Amino acid sequence: MGAEAVTTPHPAVLLVPFPAQGHVTPMLQLARALAAHGVAPTVAVPDFIHRRIAGACGGGVALASIPSGIVVPADAGDDTPPGFGAIVHAMEHHMPPHLERMLLAAAPRGGSRPVVACVVVDVLASWAVPVAARCGVPAAGFWPAMLASYRVVAAIPELIDRGLISESGTPISSDSDSDAHGGRMMAGLGILPAQVELRADELPWLVGDPATQRSRFAFWLQTLRRARGLRWVLVNSFPAESAGDDGGDDARQGPRVLPVGPALLPGSAAGGKPSCGNQHQGGGGGSSLWRADSSCMGWLDAQRAGSVVYVSFGSWVGSIGADKVRELALGLQATGRPFLWALRRDPSWRAGLPAGFADPGRGMGKVVDWAPQEDVLRHPAVGCYLTHCGWNSTLEAVRSGVRTLCYPVSGDQFINCAYITGAWGVGLRLRAMTRADVAAGVARVMDGELGARLRDKVRALRDRVVTAEARRAADRNVGAFVDDVRREGEGGRPPSLQAPTVQIYSVL
Ligand SMILES: O=c1ccn([C@@H]2O[C@H](COP(=O)(O)OP(=O)(O)O[C@H]3O[C@H](CO)[C@@H](O)[C@H](O)[C@H]3O)[C@@H](O)[C@H]2O)c(=O)[nH]1
């Protein structure tokens, strides 16, 4: 960490994201919003992320590198990020002493406490919570996804107590209609609204084969234990995610929900002065882990308004498999429409692609390694987004007023999809990854009365979420959080820190 970042008279805040694209981007946005409120933020990322985005930040946001112990084999190329297991091992066993040294080194000469006033920890990077506690620094949590998925995960202890899931997270059901069991279980406990449809096997910790599911569930139990030590949790969502949810207090979890998300958007009062450069793309604020192919924009300029299908499955879910990649390719071809497909060059992602399919100038489509996604979604030529429903992609689609065809793959994506297709009604779910379903799904989302209705609804949702008033309200809430941190740094205990409840600020 640069010395200037911690010896400043402004309160210093250290932010620790989980090291994946969908987590680093919103954490940098949060850092920018904090900087606009007079805080000196440093975002501390593992070395393998740091070397990709180093130089992208400046101004009010500093970037620090934490040694991860992960050695990238010389022949691996720089394209494939470490897997979940390797990341968790680094976070649990290699990174803590380095972070501890970083926090203690920030202490003023002769002082007994570090000058870092607060550590903001991505909830999925809970390894940093005990480190902060050892150093006597208060910790805030950051949940980079929907409030709804936070509620579902936070309900795990209650679900176990009530015998609704096993000690290893498997749903226990006498309900013969397993298609809707997950949603009914959550609605029954008041965790999700009734219209959110979720199958029992779509709960966020049910990822992969049974062994992976057990270890993912153990990860969540450990995360929840550590989250009890958080004084705040900042949630990356917008107010009233669903109709009937006013974003107010949640008596069950004791959170106070304050929307601050719109303050993180480029052009908002707080986020308006970008302190990160723009190395790879426009909206991402220089946080892109891969270099975006800017030829996308010229290609889009040559397409008719509202005609293009944009396809991307985010950064972190892995490949959907060779058979599905092939069906998707043939389905896109069968639509007879122009399409832009962001598909990483990694052989495991591209396996299944018909020969020559990605060749430039072939057919009506364009395949790129990595797109400048926010710019793409804002382009008037884009008429539909076929998405895995990662939360950042979901927000970006809503903010750009683009209808979605949903193909959730894992984790929180099923919940996000349920909101898109149910609670908000701004997209449809792809039934199966077959060429026929892809072609039919795209036509349903883009054509006729249904297509027009989806377009109107997503634009109405955009207008509700990205208003000047929403940004101002969010900005006030960022300010409230900063005031708490300042008072804490000055030795006073802010009123909100006296209660032993978790306080949630909602951020978009
Ligand atoms: O070609 C591309 C593809 C993606 N992106 C960006 O990458 C981010 C992807 O984020 P997200 O949609 O959240 O997907 P993941 O990276 O897969 O995110 C992980 O983290 C999210 C936040 O916790 C979860 O919601 C997801 O399920 C989880 O897979 C977005 O900002 C995109 O704009 C690009 O810039 N170019």
Image (cartoon, grey):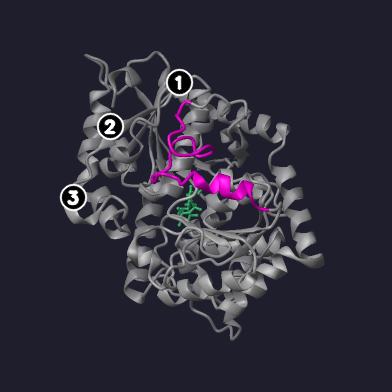
- Disc 3 marks a residue whose amino acid type is Val
Comes first in the chain, label 1 or label 2: 2
- For the C terminus, the image quarter is top right
Comes first in the chain, label 3 or label 2: 3
Comes first in the chain, label 1 or label 3: 3
Query: Residue 501 at x, y = what percent?
Result: 51, 42
Looking at the rendered image, the disc whose residue lies closer to the viewer, 3 or 2, is 3
Which residue is under mark 2?
Answer: 135
Residue 247 appears in the picture as rendered: no
Relative depth, front residue between 102 and 158 = 102
Q: Residue at x 69, y 39 (%)?
A: 466
Whole-number angstrom distance, CA of label 1 to CA of label 2 = 18 Å
- Disc 1 marks a residue whose amino acid type is Gly
Q: Residue 492's mark? A: 1
Residue stretch rendered in magenta on the structure = 275-303
In the rendered picture of this protein, how many numbered marks are placed on residues? Answer: 3
Q: Residue at x 41, y 68 (%)?
A: 207
